[in-house]
Structures are given as structure tokens and as C-alpha cells.
Amino acid sequence: MDKYVLAIDQSTQGTKALLFTENGTLCCRTDLPHRQIIDNRGYVEHDLEEIYANTIRVVKNLVEKAGIDKNQIAVLGISNQRETAACFEKSTGKPVYHAIVWQCARGAAICEELEKQGLAPMVKERTGLQLSPYFSAAKLAWIFRNVEGVKEKASEGEIAVGTIDTFLVYRLTKGKVFKTDYSNASRTQLFNIRTLSWDPDLLEAFGIAPSCMAQVTDSDGDYGTTDFEGYLDHPIPIRGVLGDSHGALFGQGCLSPGMIKTTYGTGSSIMMNIGEKPVFSDLGVVTSLAWSMGGKVNYVLEGNINYTGAVITWLKDDLKLIDNPKETADFAKSANPADHAYLVPAFSGLGAPYWDSHAQAAIVGMTRTTGKAEVVRAALDCITFQISDIVRAMGESSGLKIAELRVDGGPTKNDYLMQMQSDILDIPVRIPDSEELSGIGAAYAAGLSAGIFTEEVFGTLKRTSYEPRMDEETRQRLLAGWKDAVRMVRSQP
């Protein structure tokens, strides 16, 4: 029988199951959404039990939809939303609290405490990351401080913490495997990317016991086996685990220094492969691990934006300006060219390269000509401006020439957005014929590790291109207006 590679892509909005043939072609997909739990303080959470139940269900739905024999599934890869913090009991695998989502800034006060203690330089030097509530460490510290009994259970060795991949692997293997991969570990703000190990000083600073941390394993390593709660007749190996943005970098084939990609999702991750040695930047982008494959690590520069696709959701669900995201391109094209309104989407502060968690969102530069179409255009344009800020910082920090931007995610279907992105960056934008790059990367890692795929799998994707066509004067005028708008909303100079 033909063999299939299965990937689970557990993202911010939902959980997908993806099925790949032996030549690496994506042949079937199913997905389920989960609740976005947001309270009046702006805290953002996910129900881990709901996510796990959906993981089992999407696999069953996939097999039924594809019409295959479930015994043809040979191996599993997992990609996951990163930085989202999970805390659960080792004995039962049950969560002690909801997952705290990467968007949630509740750890800001904890980060401010550490900054006052003078620890921010140590955090940056060891992890490559700016001290920020964006990453997992402050979220986990919040749980330890605020959820009754967690600190006591941790002292007894009964608490496990990690990112979503750690929780899923633990539950899928019935508690037999407590592991995470290098890509996810590097985003927790607890992992020393120089020594490639959990950092004892950082664990102490955030108040997390070393016994709570998972074993860190190659991204194409052995993560045990699963039968999806008895659904499969025989367990299959889990052989690929990657944070979603790292998975997209791998799936995009960005395997050489200087290759760069942007994943457009709820937020966006811009990531550039910088090779086997780290480069540290003072320009607001962070250094992480791309992955470890076959025992060899690659490093990346990365910038993260909290609100990109989420800006479109805001237009639709909160402002009621659009009925469908597909409408945004036509509205943007119809907007008054003389209107210069800018939207700065700092709904939960600004991420890279500004790192200002107290900045507040605003629409600036409005005039009487600013109407519905102009606001929609400003929403799309702010996505391209934010990404441009990061790409330029990466080029300057690394000294590497950026020849093109490879992109993925649902918003890449928006022709206005993609043309504007190419125009603002003044480089080609390349779009693959699939938007499931995070899951594709996890599937590639698992399929290569299991010997089902060869390196030829990276040629499976076909790409379309947008070429820059904006004149330099217009580009610089728009970028200058954006910089002015950002300065207006920042809480600090």
C-alpha cells in the first residue's frame, strides 16, 4: 500500500490535519476552530483540553474525508503556535490552567520587575530575545504566581511546562514522552541558544523549577509513538516537531543563509536563515534557532508582529466594515490616493522592532477624505509597513543581501497586499501554490526522518511572483509617513 505522511498544524485559530502522498504532495486537509477566550483585561487564553480533543477529531475527519485506509499513515509531524504557554500535571497530563496565548501581555509587570533588577541584558545575551511578555517565560511565571497549588506541585516534581508541542506530544504518547524541539525551546526565553540547554539562571529568575522543563530534541528526532487514543490499529512514530514559523521556513526551502520568509497569520513571523553561527542584532530583531536537523543547528533572525491577519478580523468582527476578508483588496484599490491615513495596530503593544508593550493602537492622519475604503487600505498597508521594518533591520544586522521574500499564509491571496508588499520592500515576493507551509515543513521533517521523502521534496511547491513597480519617491514618502505614525503611538521615544 502507498504510505502517507500526516501533519498536525496546531495554530492560534484552530487545528488542522494535513495528509501528504509519498512524493510530498498535500492531498487532503481538515480543520476545526477552537475558542478564543478573552476577558475584560485583554487576557487571551485557549482551552488545552479543547485543543487536544480537536487534534484527535481532525485526524479522524481527515481519514474519512480522504477515503484512505488509516493503516496507510506511516509517520506524524507536528507544527504549533509558538510562545503560547502550557502548564500541566505530569501524572495525568491534565492542564492546571488554560494555555496563555502568545498575544497575551499579562506578563508585562513580571518583565518590568526583571528589567529593574538589571536582568534584561542577560536575557538578550543568552536567549537572543528581547525581555518581553510576548515569550513563554513571563506567561509561565504568571501561572506560578497566580494559580493556586502550582508552585507546590512543581516543588514535588509534578508540574510540566512548555509550548503547545510539548503538551500535544505528552498527551499523544500517553505521558511517555516529555520532549520539545530546539525551535520551540528557543522561543520560551528560558533556553540558552549558545549552550543549547535550559538556562538555570533564567529558570531561577522567572521562578520555574528545572524539573518542569522538557528534554530538548532534534526537530527531526524521535518523539515516541501515538495511536490517537486508539483510533489507529497500530501506533505511528512522531518524527518531526517544529514551531509554526520554523516549519514554514523549512517548508519554503529557506535552507541557506540570507533566505527569508514571512508567514502571514493572525500575527506574522518574519524569519531569515543566518546559518550555523548566531548573529545578534541591536535593531529590534531577535536571534533564535531555526531547527536542529540530524544533530546540526541553524540559527535565524526573527521579528514578530502581533497584529497582521488579526487586523482584518478586527475590520470584520469589531468595526463591521467588511463582511468578508476578500473584500479588502477591492476597497483598498478604490481608496482615495490623496488620503494619507495610517493605522498603527498596537492593540496589545508593538512587537519587533519596537518592543513597546504599552503602545496603543491609533488611526492617525485622518482628514475629511478618510472613509471606509481608506481605513481598509490603511489596515492592509500597516501589514506591509510592519514587515518592511523587520526585513530592513535583518538585512542591516546580518550584512546579507535579501534577494526575495518568500511568503505564506491565507492573506497571500490578497493581490493588493502582495503587490504593496513587493513595492514597499522593492524586492520580488514569491508565493507558493499552498498556504499550509507550517504543516508542510513539519511533514517534510517527519517524512525525511522516516525515509519516505528525499531532498527532492523541496521542489514540490510551485510559486507565483509579484515584482516591485512603485517609484522610489512614493515609496520613501509612504515609509516616512509610517514612521511618523509609529512615533505618535509609542509610549517611549
Image (cartoon, helix red, strand yellow):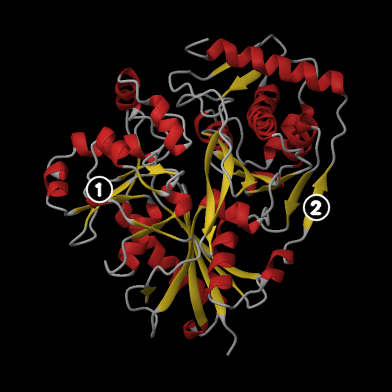
| Most foreground residue, 280 or 186 | 280
Task: State which quarter of the image contains the N terminus.
Answer: bottom right
**Residue 136, position as x, y percentages in the image:** 37, 40
Q: Going 80% across and 15% down the picture, which residue do you hit? A: 338
Kind of residue at disc 1 = Pro
Expressed as whole percent of the image width and height from the top left, the position of residue 410 reads 63, 48
**Residue 341 visible:** no
| Circle 2: element type | strand
Residue that numbered label 2 is attached to: 464
In this figure, what is the number of numbered marks? 2
User: Which residue lies at the image location 43% right of the left edge and 75% below the top edge?
Assistant: 237
The correct choice, above or below, for 408 with respect to 307 in the image is below
The structure residue drawn at horizontal position 22% and vertical position 57%, both measured from the top left corner, is: 94
- Is residue 404 visible to the viewer in this orientation of the structure? yes
Q: Which residue is mark 1?
A: 210
Q: Earlier in the sequence, mark 1 or mark 2?
A: 1
For residue 88, side relative to residue 436 (left or right): left
Residue type at the position of mark 2 = Thr
How many residues crowd mark 1 within 10 Å: few (<14), some (14–19), many (20+)?
Answer: some
**Mark-to-mark CA distance, 1 and 2:** 47 Å
137 lies left or right of 30? left
Q: Nearer the viewer, mark 1 or mark 2?
A: 1
Does dot 1 land on a helix, a strand or a loop?
helix
For disc 2, the neighbor class at 10 Å (few under 14, some 14 to 19, many from 20) is few
Residue closest to the far bottom:
1
Image spot of residue 465 (x, y percent): 81, 48
